[in-house]
Amino acid sequence: MANVKRSPWILHYDGSSCNGCDIEVLACMTPVYDAERLGVENTGDPMQADILLITGGINAQNAPVVKQLYDQMPRPKVVVAVGICACTGGVFKDCYNILGGADKVIPVDIYVPGCAARPESIIDGIVQARDLFQKRSEEHDALIRKQKMEKNAKENG
Amino acid sequence: MDKKSIIPFGPQHPVLPEPIHLDLEIQDEKVLRAIPNIGFIHRGLEGLVEKKDFNTMVYVAERICGICSFGHGMAYCEALEDVMHVEVPERAKFLRTIWMEFSRLHSHLLWLGLCADAFGFESLYYECWRIREHVLDVMENTTGGRIIFSVNQIGGVHRDLSDEQVRYLNTRLDAIEADVKNVEKTLFHDATIEKRTRGLGVLTKEQAHDLGAVGPFARASGIAIDMRQTGYEAYGQLDFAPVTAEDGDCYSRIVVRTKEIYQSIDLIRQALSKLPKGDLNVPIVRGMPKGEAMARVEQPRGEAIYYVHGDGTRFLKRFRVRTPTFANIAPLCHMLQGANYADVGILVLSIDPCISCTER
């Protein structure tokens, strides 16, 4: 099934953003921008999600939550940091409770800057994430196939 | 069965885009108690006054919340104008009022959409967000930003409306009003919405008063409290009365917010027709802020209180915000007692929670 394009599902989590990027992420999913035409779908369940959209910086209380959400997602997975706060901490970088961007706790693949990030740039991030997800899925499939073949070879002598 | 169990609600939950955590003590399907746990978005924004000067803080204040950002920036400017004895020009007051009402429009449409999504009415959700995009187009055309406008400054605003833009706003308002009228038929007369919200989460007038509810949430319980009646900015020169409903259930909250959309459209029309000529801002000549002041404004979610204290330096000594959702959490927890577990999502949403305001 490796030649079939996949339809990645998106999980959105609000780290400590001001809501600006969150509602832009939601606006991407609604009729005017309609990111769902690209084959992605918004989900509320991390265990079914392939792409994590994270907005806002990391603080002491949400760091374990973000880490847990990332761990709950099945492999392969892609992380997109939406908005300047998720990239570096942004305007709140100097706040006493902000540790920095999302890459402080989880590996981030794609950075979407902006305050608030515009829907066009978020969709661009989603498109890049979708392509990266496709590439990783193929690598993952190849790895699984290889492991299966090795296992079979071992069992059959 | 009298066994109790605790079910966590949030911080990541499909109903809310924002993280709030509630520990729900459940017996069978009934919620006995809801214990809120906040702090997932706490940034320590008020402490930034030590690092950023009072002029730059306008832009930080706007980023307390992305939905009511204009109101936050405006309230901060009002408090500092009070400290520094700056008299804002009339035209700036009217422009602020117009943009404030536009941000209320977009906030209420956003909430109606999310509310529809919470009880599974997805086409209504999409329709509300489609109308909201028209409001955002207007904001982008007049201020340059979709969500964060950054047009406020201490002493006024730094963007003007041309005559052509005023005409454009009037035509767009007509279109938005017609669209909302269309949606209103579904909101007020659809059987599924009534079944899902009528009589749900009732908060009586006395309870709302005693627990300190604010904004449309309190007005849906029959308390006619609206900070715009105090007449800050240009509201004193406009004609309006608070929208209230009597039942205090989720349905009346939908009704109040829908009627407030019409009220905002009406207020913008009044302000556009009375828009005076003149300066946009006054230069600040009196040096640094010294003394303390408070400002109270009506955000889309209710009353927000701003306190600033300057000691004559570039940096404020203290900056404090009391936001509407913080006041509404106590009534929410009261409302959740005895509710069905399946209704918790819509009940939490019915106060129009803005967690990033609450925790800053």
Image (cartoon, coloured by chain):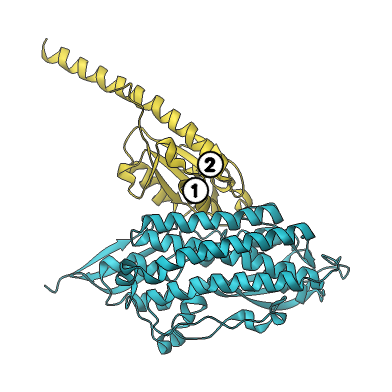
Q: Distance between the residues labelled 2 and 1?
A: 7 Å
Q: Which chain is yellow?
A: A
Residue bearing the label numbered 2: A122
User: Regarding mark 1 in the picture, which secondary structure is present there?
Assistant: helix
Residue A146 appearing in the image: yes
Task: Indicate whether B224 appears above or below A7.
Answer: below
* Front residue (pair B296, B288): B296
Answer with left or right where residue B330 lies relative to residue B175. Answer: left
Host chain of mark 1 = A
The residue located at (42%, 90%) in the rendering is B206
Residues indicated by labels 2 and 1 sit on the same polypeptide chain: yes
The spot of residue A115 in percent (x, y) is 62, 49
In the rendered image, is residue B37 in sight?
Answer: no
The furthest residue to the top: A157
Query: Color used for chain B?
Result: cyan
Tell me where residue B227 sits by quadrant: bottom right
The residue lying at 47 percent from left, 48 percent from top is A31
- The structure residue drawn at horizontal position 73% and vertical position 67%, both measured from the top left corner, is B95
Answer whether labels 2 and 1 touch (C-beta < 8 Å).
Answer: yes
Measured as percent of width and height from the top left, residue A52 is found at 42, 42
Location of residue B172 by image quarter: bottom right
Q: Mark 1 points at which residue?
A: A25
Of the 4 image quadrants, the one containing the N terminus of chain B is bottom left
Horizontally, residue B55 falls left or right of residue B193, namely right
Amino acid at pointer 1: Val
Find residue B42 and report its horizontal and vertical position in percent: 51, 60
